[in-house]
Amino acid sequence: MQPETANISVDDADLVEQCRQGDSEATERLILKYQNRIYNAVLKICGNTDDAAELTQDTFVKIIENIDKFESRSSFYTWAFRIAVNLTLNYCQRSSRLRFRSLDAEESEHDAQTKQVLKTYLTDDASPDPAAVAQNKELCEMVVKALARLDDEQRAVVVLRDIEGMNYSQIAEVLETELGTVKSRLSRARGELREVMEAICNDG
Amino acid sequence: MTDNLNIDELLNGLIDGELNAREETEVQRLIAHDERVAQRLRELQNCKVLVGSLPCAEAPAGMAEQIKASLGRSAPIVQPPLRIEQVGAMHLLLRKVAAVAAMVGLVAVLGAVVYTIVSSDSDTERPVAVKDWERPVGELKTVKPEVRVAAVTEKRALKPAPAEMEFTGRLELETKELAIVEASINRAIEDNRLLERISPERHGNDRVYTINCGSEALRLLLADLDNIWQKFDSARLVVETDRVGEQVVVESVGTGQVIEIVKQDSLAARIAVARDFAVLNKMEELSPGKEMFAAIDDAQADLTVIPKPVLTSSEKAMKERSSQPEEGQRVHLIILLVEHQ
């Protein structure tokens, strides 16, 4: 899912300007345009649908309340995601204990067959078929759990790159960090993610 | 370990298309020559595909409505602040317009003042207080506007232009306390030994003093009159110019201003100073607070306050006064003292 950043920027500039001038229709269009993408990224980072819905809502409230402060030096797209990711990471930090306990309780629910499928994908020279992966709900849950085992910041980098499809520069803007930090964090995150998935496959 | 991390970074960069041409060439060569690096690349690629293949979750239905509801609870969306901003802008605009109108009004008032002064110099038909030098003093009582115009017209034909060094003018004073003021003037004339140079005449209730003396003698006389100056309801000095029939009229003139005008050593300087005082006094008259002019008066104390001679003994005073009246410019001044009705 690669974002069409060029088109988004052009449209966003108009919508943001109309939104600033109190156009409620433009505000609604801005929400509808980004709500699914932000909700999806937030959900993959925080791991809970209710919390993701609430965080997404808080994100848009904050976006609209602060729309006058938005400077056109960055794109609205990265600015909006910065707000969403900051809110989500703050939330994850506050509720980390509860989240890990929940993951431990669900650890042993996957069947052996799905674990074998995952192990095959990890070791096979051939690349996995994305459609087949998406249709395998059990497999997806295992990948999500593996993601949840990463540090919050590593998970955020992987989500922004592999799920939201941002390039390194955009990720650096969203996380307000250096490009080199993004590269090293993503490299470590993918390495650890693979190890976690292998551990899930080999467990029990 | 560090090498592995660096290789992982390069491999991830290759997977994500973030390497430059040189880096990409280097990594491709590394992959081609090292099977372990090639294997690691495939592992990382598969990991990326697994994460990227996760289905996209959609936001719960009614998210937009909930957001708008939240915005309504926390703060009115954007329009109310905009309305407040518009009202504020309107107030600001009105204030700007009011300020501009006030400025225009002030400029108009100042312009009118300046025009009044300037036109008094050029408009020969303007009614002014002018003495007809050639007429009997008794006719001076006809100080009505229409009569004054006639007097000016007539004077043009009769009176020659004043000499460059000689001051010629007229001081018109009005008072309700005529007897007290007259006594004070007479005493001042006597004290300054100017009886020979001043010829007082009485015409009904009016008094006319024709003064021919030096400017220093006049200064001493006016210094003595300074004490009673507040008893005058009006004091106006009419200064003759070099053009027949034209005068500069200084309203609300003070003794210091009279002296300052008289002591100028040329006619042009006298006229210029008289005009300045005329403008100054007119502006002071129009100014409600008069604070500005009080400050000006303070700054120009030498123009408005007459330094009186310090008397250490009666003999010295007599000696000084006997020698002073001839000093300074020649002055020909008519003082007209009338009772204020």
Image (tube, coloured by chain):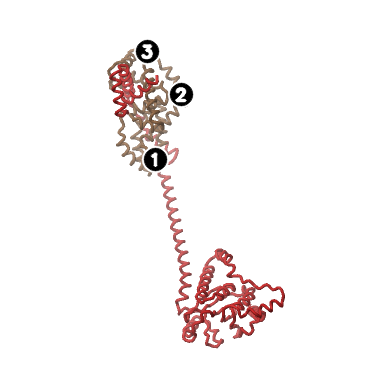
In this picture, residue B61 sits left or right of residue B110: left
Badge 3 vs badge 1, beta-carbon distance below 8 Å: no
Q: Amino acid at mark 3?
A: Asn
Mark number for residue B45?
A: none
From this view, report whether residue B199 is shown above or below residue B301: below
Crowdedness near tag 3: few (<14), some (14–19) or many (≥20) residues, C-alpha within 10 Å:
few
Choose between B246 and B165: the one closer to the eye. Answer: B165
The percent position of residue B54, horizontal first and vertical second, equals 33, 23
Q: Amino acid at mark 2?
A: Ser
The percent position of residue B300, horizontal first and vertical second, equals 57, 67
Crowdedness near tag 1: few (<14), some (14–19) or many (≥20) residues, C-alpha within 10 Å:
few
From this view, report whether residue B19 is shown above or below residue B324: above
Separation (CA) of disc 1 from disc 2: 33 Å
The percent position of residue A11, horizontal first and vertical second, equals 31, 39
Circle 1 residue: A71
Circle 2 residue: A96
Chain A painted colour:
brown
**Residue found farthest to the top:** A204
Chain B painted colour:
red
Circle 3 residue: A202
Same chain for mark 2 and mark 3? The answer is: yes
Describe the element under mark 3 as helix, strand or loop: helix
The percent position of residue A160, horizontal first and vertical second, equals 36, 28
Describe the element under mark 1 as helix, strand or loop: loop
In this picture, residue B204 sits left or right of residue B76: right
- Inspect this view and state whether residue B210 appears: yes
